[in-house]
């Protein structure tokens, strides 16, 4: 009996050994929702004989808090550029070895020169450009101004949402009042607070995720949201329309970064390089409706995508739009304001 038990145990140990030896490496990524085409993940898994586990967040502050709080196990993160800078300054992400990222040659040099925060791509690789704009149900919303002032319209009280994002909503209020998006002037922030409190009387809630479903189902008739997310809704619900406020909007870029302590470093580099290839970039443009920072991918876009409103924002609006920046110690002013308007 002892011999039999010993033989069984030996077989189980052998199976466990070979099972571990033959298991696929796993890449853990933490990204915005609805942002990566499922087929891109499948193609990467097949090409590199691995598994990809995707976790999602709905705002940069949630990503920052989770990683700052000690969450480990992620190999690739996707913060917006301003948050990537904060995380790099705090040594939460690593400098990149660009020799392992040959597809960086496809990153749009004009974007790097004119708009990027990390112009040398020292710690981040640009993925997609995002604008925060407005979507409305054209069957129910008529004769609205092309302006942030629409949130003061009591006709739509209880049927509108504002982004639950400190920089986006404060930024919108600042732009409405003719100030710079990244202003830290006390008087200008006070005016922005007054504006948001006025808007708050009419909005159902501050929200960073459910607005997509809400505008699609008719729960909400007008929402403040991210351009690609809203374009995804419009693809299914053409009566939903976009409005780009004449005062200007926020511009942000979401980047690929690698956190300190990444377990699968080589696979992380392969993933970022894979996502930066033109064919994969355009695949994700088609899926997400966002604008890739990839000059070659733009040449591969379908005519349908080229004609999407998010790819054709009026020049006069873009001229007044600004990139969200990290405000350093002055962020405290915004956090205080944000706490006060959300009480």
Image: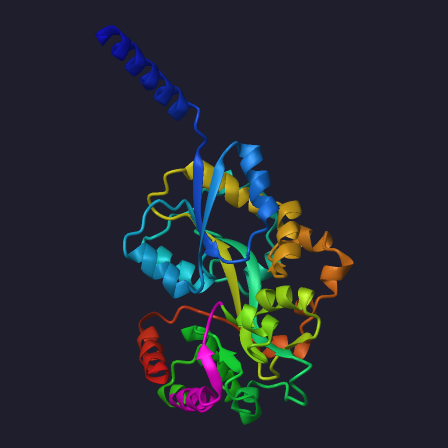
> Is residue 188 shown in magenta?
no
Residue 222 image position (x, y, % from top left): 58, 80
Q: Is residue 102 above or below residue 213?
A: above
Colouring of the image:
rainbow
Q: Is residue 246 above or below residue 266?
A: below
Residue 304 image position (x, y, % from top left): 75, 61
State the quadrant of the C terminus.
bottom left
Look at the image and give the residue range highlighted in magenta.
190-209
Which corner quadrant of the image does residue 218 belong to? bottom right
Which corner quadrant of the image does residue 191 belong to? bottom left
Q: How many badges with numbers are in the image?
A: 0
Q: Is residue 325 above or below residue 292?
A: below
Instruction: Answer yes or no: is residue 254 visible.
Output: yes
Which corner quadrant of the image does residue 311 belong to? bottom right
The foreground one among 330 and 288 is: 288
| Residue at 49% from the left image edge and 56% from the top image edge | 255
Residue 116 image position (x, y, % from top left): 52, 62
Instruction: Answer yes or no: is residue 181 visible.
Output: no
Horizontally, residue 197 falls left or right of residue 131, namely: left
> Is residue 208 shown in magenta?
yes
The foreground one among 44 and 124 is: 44
| Residue at 44% from the left image edge and 48% from the top image edge | 29
State the quadrant of the N terminus.
top left
Q: Is residue 11 above or below residue 146?
A: above
| Residue at 66% from the left image edge and 46% from the top image edge | 279
Residue 178 image position (x, y, % from top left): 52, 88
């Amino acid at each position: 009996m002892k011999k039999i038990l010993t033989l069984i145990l030996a077989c189980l140990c052998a199976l466990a050994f070979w099972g571990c030896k033959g298991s696929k490496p796993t890449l853990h990524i933490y990204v915005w929702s609805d942002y990566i085409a499922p087929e891109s993940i499948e193609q990467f898994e097949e090409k590199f004989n691995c598994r990809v586990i995707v976790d999602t967040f709905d705002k940069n502050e949630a990503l920052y808090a989770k990683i700052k709080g000690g969450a480990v196990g992620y190999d690739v993160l996707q913060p917006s550029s301003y948050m990537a800078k904060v995380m790099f300054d705090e040594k939460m992400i690593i400098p990149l070895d660009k020799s392992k990222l040959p597809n960086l040659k496809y990153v749009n040099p004009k974007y790097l020169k004119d708009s990027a925060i990390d112009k040398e791509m020292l710690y981040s690789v640009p993925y997609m450009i995002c604008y925060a704009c407005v979507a409305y149900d054209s069957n129910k919303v008529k004769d609205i101004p092309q302006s942030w002032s629409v949130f003061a319209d009591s006709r739509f009280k209880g049927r509108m949402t504002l982004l639950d994002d400190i920089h986006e909503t404060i930024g919108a209020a600042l732009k409405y009042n003719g100030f710079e998006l990244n202003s830290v002037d006390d008087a200008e922030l006070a005016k922005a607070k007054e504006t948001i409190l006025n808007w708050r009387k009419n909005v159902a809630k501050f929200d960073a995720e459910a607005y997509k479903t809400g505008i699609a189902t008719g729960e909400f008739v007008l929402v403040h949201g991210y351009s690609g997310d809203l374009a995804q809704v419009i693809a299914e619900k053409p009566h939903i329309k976009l409005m780009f406020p004449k005062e200007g909007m926020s511009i942000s870029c979401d980047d690929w970064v690698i956190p300190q302590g990444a377990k699968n470093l080589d696979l992380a580099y392969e993933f970022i390089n894979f996502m930066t290839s033109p064919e994969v970039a355009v695949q994700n443009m088609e899926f997400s409706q966002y604008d890739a920072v990839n000059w070659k991918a733009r040449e591969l876009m379908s005519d349908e995508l080229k004609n999407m409103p998010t790819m054709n924002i009026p020049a006069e609006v873009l001229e007044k739009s600004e990139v969200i920046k990290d405000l350093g110690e002055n962020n405290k002013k915004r956090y205080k304001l944000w706490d006060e308007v959300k009480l």
